[in-house]
Amino acid sequence: MHPNRAFRDAGDATNLAFARDQGFGILTVSNGTAAPLVSHVPFLLNEAGTEALVHLARPNPIVAALAAPASARLVIAGPHGYVSPDWYRIEDQVPTWNYVAVHLTGTLELTPQAGLQDLLDRQSAEFERRLPKRPWTSDKMTGGLMERMMRAIVPARLAIEEIDGTWKLSQNKPEAVRRAAADGVEAAGDPALAALMRTPPDRA
């Protein structure tokens, strides 16, 4: 996380809402003295924001590492982009990179295979409801096929013990300067990042 506290004052509720909306992150697990194990995973946060549910391909090295629960971190990245000094419309500025990132840290463990179908159904329901169509459901699958496919994946749960967020959106600049930079970011083709720059994160 960024050391400047100006970029880290979003509250847990704001960080969790961002993570829930993204629904996809980078799961990292310590691997002793070697580089951390990393997997890109969709996830489902419970309502309280105390656990993230994921599924992993059975051959994934993280699965083998979870013979016992392990410390893990789920990294969720949002919009990010280069900010040109010219866009601030004041002198003596330097280039920077604005971004949003949330880290959910805790203990990762495998969960019973019997709960996998429910997890997959709830996961697909969450993302299907965001689409402009009738939701897909697993009962559309040919009988027995879903069960066979599920043998290739395993469910896991991250018990969340720490929530951290960086919202580096030029909020260390005067509002007029930040908004001018946001206009430049949008003109360069990144309206999502520009919108976040115009509305600093909630501290709740």
Image (tube, grey):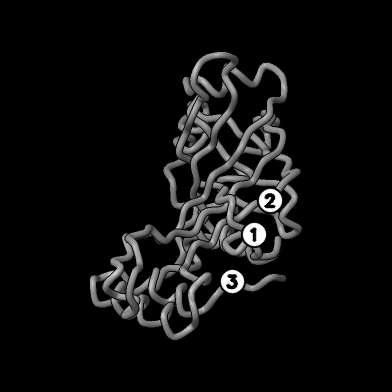
How many residues crowd around disc 2 within 10 Å: few (fewer than 14), some, or many (20 or more)?
some
x and y percentages locating residue 161 in the rendered image: 75, 43
Instruction: Name the residue nearer the viewer: 103 or 94.
Output: 94
Q: Residue furthest bottom?
A: 176
Q: CA distance from mark 1 to mark 2?
A: 8 Å
CB contact under 8 Å: marks 2 and 3: no
Amino acid on which the number 3 mark rests in the picture: Pro
- Callout 3: SS: loop
How many residues crowd around disc 1 within 10 Å: few (fewer than 14), some, or many (20 or more)?
many
Q: Which residue is label 2 attached to?
A: 163
In the shown orientation, is residue 123 left or right of residue 182? right
Residue 132 position (above or below residue 116): below
Can you tell which mark lies on residue 65?
none
x and y percentages locating residue 25 in the rendered image: 50, 46
Amino acid on which the number 2 mark rests in the picture: Ile
x and y percentages locating residue 144 in the rendered image: 49, 35
Q: Residue at point 51% right, 15% down?
A: 34
In the shown orientation, is residue 50 left or right of residue 25? right
Instruction: Name the residue nearer the viewer: 67 or 95.
Output: 95
Amino acid on which the number 1 mark rests in the picture: Leu
Q: Residue at point 37% right, 77% down?
A: 182
Q: CA distance from mark 3 to mark 1?
A: 12 Å
Can you tell which mark lies on residue 201?
3
Q: Which residue is label 1 attached to?
A: 16
